[in-house]
Amino acid sequence: MMRGRSGEGRYRVSRRPRKGSRWSGRLRRPCPAAGFAVARFLEGEVKQMANLPFARSPGQENHHMQAEDAELEQFRRGVNCAALLEGWLPSWRVDRRESTRRALKYRREEGEVLIVNHDGRGWWDPQSTAKGDIFDLVQYLDPNLNFGQVRRELRRFVGVAPSFPLARSSRGKNDSSAPIAGRWMARPRLRRGSAVWAYLAGTRRLPDQILEAAQRADILREGPYGSAWFAHRDEANAVTHIEIRGPGFKGSLRGGTKTLFRLAGGGPRHNRLVITEAPIDTLSVAAIEGIRADTLYAATGGGMGPGTLQAIERLLAEMARWPDALLAGATDANRAGERYAARHAELAAAAGIAFERLAPPLGADWNDVLVQWRPR
């Protein structure tokens, strides 16, 4: 509330204060119902606004804008998305086993996952289309904040370093210089009687028929220490990413780009696409169904990045030619799995094809189902 005096009497000018300004705590009184304050304001009182404390000269306004621009740039350069997640309440925890120097995976509660990339300047939600910079991240974490409140939150994190090291512009000594496809070719093919075969056939209960089909498609090779390597391949059948599973290890090779792990049925066309999270779940569904000829079984490797989404969209665009095309979301029966399945449903709707939720029992994945279905 500001008060001034005209030649004929008093008037009031009421303005909504900016949060944090020196007017934010002052009481605002309503103008009288008669409306004469507005009339006199329109008769010439605008000139007196230049003398009010909240008005700025053009020079002051320019200086204020420059200061704001400098602070915004400081936020962009000096606030790390990973450090913000670690300091946010309730806090997020880095999944060190699932993280690389270029992509840090953070988790909070059941099913909540965010990926930090671009040296800490970017992020994305693998369970939705949400992504952006540090400003978008704050508003994603608390949609009720306006931009001024976002800036106030960011001031707390300027210069704060995350607990896990981020990617550097130069190649680190632990980064392999060999391309993903070359490292794949250097590993031996799956063979009956090996430690990897014993793990997949014994612990995971995958039948010989499925392991032989994966071996023929060259989507499964033997890694060190009895670990199984699963290949993501693109439309040109090139290896783009490698997931690793073993008796005591779960991870992936660095330097790759997720697309899709794929096992195709033997039919002339695939009008049905089944998507799971992990390659072992893909093989498990195929085993339970006996590898349907009309089906392409695929795994995203958990979260769906840009490469995975593009691969799914291309497949759905091809399948849309068939009136009986169907996308089945065979993700895990938990909160994360339901979110992935909901995203699959959106992709199917956008492509104009049918969708069904192919869900295992509550709290389980499809390998759990296979293990119970094929006891020792």
Image (cartoon, grey):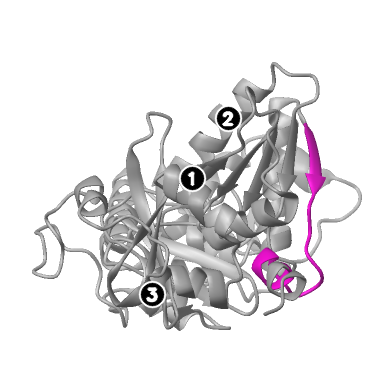
Query: Considering depth in this image, is 281 or 337 the residue closer to the camera?
Result: 281
First of labels 2, 3 by sequence position: 3
Label 2–label 1 contact, CB within 8 A? yes
Quarter holding the C terminus?
Answer: bottom right
- The span shown in magenta is 354-369
Q: Residues within 10 Å of mark 2 (few under 14, many from 20)?
A: some
Q: Residue at x 44, y 62 (%)?
A: 115
Q: Where residue 267 sits in the image (x, y, percent)?
A: 64, 28
Question: Does 149 lie within the magenta span?
Answer: no
Up/down of 91 relative to 238, above or below: below
Q: Is residue 360 left or right of residue 218?
A: right
Q: Quadrant of residue 127?
A: bottom right
Q: Where residue 280 sits in the image (x, y, percent)?
A: 55, 62
Q: Residues within 10 Å of mark 3 (few under 14, many from 20)?
A: some
User: Element under label 3?
Assistant: helix
The amino acid beneath tag 2 is Leu
Up/down of 157 relative to 189, above or below: below
Label annotation for residue 195: 3
Q: Where residue 34 sits in the image (x, y, percent)?
A: 91, 48
Query: Considering depth in this image, is 109 or 370 the residue closer to the camera?
Result: 370
Q: Which tag is nearer the camera, tag 1 or tag 3?
A: 3
> Residue at label 2?
315
> Residue at label 1?
260
Q: CA distance from mark 2 to mark 1?
A: 11 Å
